[in-house]
Image (cartoon, grey):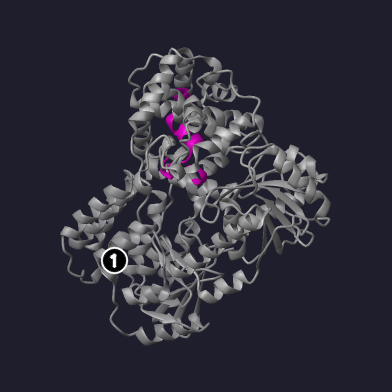
């Protein structure tokens, strides 16, 4: 079956691209477009042509199935040049999304009509790339250099009407007759001179714009490669003809494509698509009906979960043990809606309609109408078991019982309910109304339909639900212990906390581990450790954090943690008292302090993550290395351009990672640095974590 169809409506040719699901620019589509142009060009009975797409969208971009494969002719830049230089008027009819190569194809055409609901954009920067088929040359000719840079550097699509005002779209069709209107428009312009984008006069440009943009990009992009190349290409567009400009652009595109940053960002994109596919779950697994949700615990986490559920259209009842707790939770939820209205994220009418589905209660027995109960109480096993014992008694048959625990044994919590098949972990990340990630923790007895329903629920919340197995800390927090352990040890060894944070932020982490601890509250981890009976027999283990908590230094909320936060400031400031505390404790423990090199700070923290990730794969807690990457990029600030810890290790080479881990074992002992067998096996066979299947 051909993915391009050519037919005629009178003297107008209609080219239809039909390559489900999003009409991606596969080799077959590119070749089909060139064939259609050849046939139209040789037919004297055709005056003009309309390019349209079947299904729910115009061309939505490149075909991800061709990522990493050698490109095949015709290359997309050749298609775009052929469209621009074509001898008969071409009208692109845009609906759905015209993104990346799709918009480049549309700009190669001579006119663009768009449905009112259409979106257009060049999001390549999000994959560490730049538009490589004329986008950096054509868009400035249509909208000017400044607007083109804004659109390409942000990667954000824009709706049809703003696109028309900017000059990308010639006309917006507000009714449902886009193709009919496009054919009529093609008849109108059939005998007129062709307005080729390549021949458009560039709007005047202040050349200082490019240096200003380079400075802005350098300040906010953390060393990303592609934004600077986009600026270079647009600067070239100001003075070059289209063919020369596209040659310059193509070289820049290939340099971006070959970079490790683009490889990491493309891995991140594909990993997130695969993570939502639940392993070992039949596609036909039914889901339970979820309309009414009860959230137990009206603290910051519970209120954030309640807000997320309300904005997704669910009815929500927020429960807490007393009126004071409920009052605080209700105030938080209503405040989030007020903030959303103030920022223009939703209308007052929508906010009022959502809040009409919101109720509060202090009686735990009032859960009988709930389809899903999400427990978000204090992180204490005894408390959670008590809650689930009550839920087992009061919830209706078939209700799903979810715990928001971040570390505790989901199977033990499930057993307390007396109906373990209905229990699952839904570990939201804080703040729950903002963070995309949810770890969906499959217990030993969790029913398949509960798992399927939970995955669908996360999707409805517009969150990224990643299914993991049950162990202490699951994937994210289990690995966090290894990352934080090395930070804590290096503090005692002589690395100042502000220096560790600076080095890891420069490497790409969103925040340093010490600032993160202060933000979350150092006491959170302290209390979690008090719940455990399997901690290492090591007096150094999280000892600095323990001492800080025991001195009342809990982080930002107390104005003092590892750092100082003066007068309510969020900016961490080094505190000599903390450094003295660390020095004194190191002396007490007999640790000789030294200057810890920057590369050691990075490798010990990041390879601490990698080794624990390898053990998680060995244990079957994560089904895929890419799932670990998704969790750490979306929940813990791991830089997307490095692709997550496991992809990063693959990109370094597991033989090199293994050698460095063995070096740490020999220097610091096997307690923490004995290489996992999986890492050893993969390194010895020149394989990668991406190759591993449990």
Q: Is residue 125 left or right of residue 239?
A: right
Depth check, front residue: 182 or 385: 385
In the rendered view, would you say 602 is above or below 36?
Answer: above
Q: Is residue 584 left or right of residue 347?
A: left
Rendered location of residue 13, percent (x, y): 45, 78
**Element at badge 1?**
helix
Where's the N terminus, which quadrant? bottom right
Where's the C terminus, which quadrant? top right
650 part of magenta stretch: yes
Rendered location of residue 164, percent (x, y): 36, 76
In the rendered view, would you say 90 is above or below 145?
Answer: below
Depth check, front residue: 573 or 41: 573
Depth check, front residue: 297 or 692: 297
Label 1, on which residue? 147
Q: Residue at x 60, y 38 (%)?
A: 624
90 part of magenta stretch: no
The residues colored magenta run 634-657
The mark total stands at: 1
Q: Residue at x 52, y 66 (%)?
A: 337
User: In this view of the protein, can residue 169 be seen by the observer?
Assistant: no
Q: Residue at x 50, y 36 (%)?
A: 522
Q: Is residue 55 left or right of residue 143?
A: right
User: In this view of the protein, can residue 611 be seen by the observer?
Assistant: yes
């Amino acid at each position: 079956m051909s993915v391009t169809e050519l037919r005629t409506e009178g003297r107008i040719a209609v080219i239809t691209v039909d390559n489900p699901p999003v009409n991606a620019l596969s080799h077959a589509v590119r070749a089909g477009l060139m064939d259609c142009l050849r046939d139209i060009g040789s037919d004297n009975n055709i005056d003009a042509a309309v390019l349209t797409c079947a299904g729910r969208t115009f061309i939505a971009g490149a075909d991800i199935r061709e990522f990493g494969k050698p490109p095949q002719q015709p290359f997309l830049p050749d298609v775009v040049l052929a469209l621009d230089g074509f001898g008969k008027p071409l009208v692109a009819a845009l609906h759905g999304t015209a993104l990346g190569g799709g918009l480049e194809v549309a700009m190669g055409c001579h006119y663009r009509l768009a449905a009112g609901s259409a979106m257009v954009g060049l999001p390549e920067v999000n994959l560490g790339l730049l538009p490589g088929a004329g986008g950096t040359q054509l868009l400035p000719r249509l909208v000017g250099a400044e607007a083109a840079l804004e659109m390409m550097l942000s990667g954000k699509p824009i709706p049809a009407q703003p696109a028309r005002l900017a000059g990308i779209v010639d006309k917006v069709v507000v009714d449902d007759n886009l193709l009919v209107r496009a054919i009529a428009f093609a008849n109108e312009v059939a005998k007129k001179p062709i307005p080729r984008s390549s021949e458009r006069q560039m709007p005047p440009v202040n050349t200082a714009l490019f240096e200003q943009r380079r400075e802005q990009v350098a300040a906010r992009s953390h060393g990303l490669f592609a934004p600077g190349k986009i600026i270079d290409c647009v600067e070239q567009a100001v003075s070059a003809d289209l063919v020369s400009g596209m040659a310059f652009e193509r070289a820049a595109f290939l340099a971006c494509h070959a970079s490790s940053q683009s490889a990491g960002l493309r891995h991140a994109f594909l990993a997130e698509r695969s993570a939502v596919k639940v392993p070992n779950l039949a596609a036909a697994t039914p889901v339970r009906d979820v309309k009414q949700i009860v959230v137990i615990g009206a603290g910051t986490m519970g209120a954030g979960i309640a807000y997320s559920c309300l904005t997704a259209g669910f009815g929500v009842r927020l429960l807490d043990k007393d009126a004071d707790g409920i009052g605080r939770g209700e105030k938080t939820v209503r405040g989030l809606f007020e903030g959303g209205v103030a920022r223009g994220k939703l209308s007052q009418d929508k906010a009022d309609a959502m809040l009409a589905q919101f109720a509060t209660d202090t009686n735990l027995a009032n859960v009988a109408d709930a389809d899903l109960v999400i427990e978000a109480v204090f992180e204490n096993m005894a408390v959670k078991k008590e809650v689930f014992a009550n839920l087992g008694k009061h919830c209706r048959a078939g209700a799903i019982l979810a715990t928001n625990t971040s570390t505790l044994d989901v199977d033990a919590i499930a057993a307390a309910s007396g109906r373990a098949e209905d229990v699952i972990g839904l570990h939201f990340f804080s703040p729950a109304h903002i963070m995309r990630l949810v770890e969906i923790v499959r217990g030993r007895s969790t029913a398949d339909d509960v798992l399927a329903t939970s995955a669908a629920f996360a999707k409805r919340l517009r969150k990224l639900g990643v299914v993991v197995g049950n162990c202490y800390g699951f994937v994210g927090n289990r690995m966090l212990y290894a990352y934080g352990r090395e930070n804590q040890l290096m503090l005692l060894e002589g690395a100042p906390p502000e220096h560790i944070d600076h080095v890891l932020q420069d490497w790409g982490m969103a925040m340093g581990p010490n600032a993160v601890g202060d933000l979350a509250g150092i006491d959170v981890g302290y209390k979690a450790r008090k719940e455990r009976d399997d901690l290492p027999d090591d007096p150094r283990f999280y000892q600095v954090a323990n001492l800080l908590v025991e001195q009342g230094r809990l982080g930002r909320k107390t104005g003092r943690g590892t750092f100082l936060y003066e007068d309510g400031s969020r900016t961490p400031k080094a505190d000599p008292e903390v450094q003295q505390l660390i020095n004194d404790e190191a002396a007490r423990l007999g640790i000789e302090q030294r200057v810890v090199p920057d590369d050691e700070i990075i490798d010990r923290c990041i390879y601490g993550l990698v080794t624990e990730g390898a053990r998680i794969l060995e244990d079957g807690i994560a089904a895929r290395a890419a799932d670990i990457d998704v969790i750490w990029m979306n929940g813990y600030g791991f830089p997307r351009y490095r692709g997550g810890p496991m992809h990063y290790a693959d990109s370094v080479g597991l033989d090199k990672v293994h050698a460095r881990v063995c070096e740490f074992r020999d220097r610091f002992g096997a307690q923490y640095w004995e290489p996992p067998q999986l890492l050893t096996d993969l390194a010895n066979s020149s394989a990668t974590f991406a190759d591993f299947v449990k």
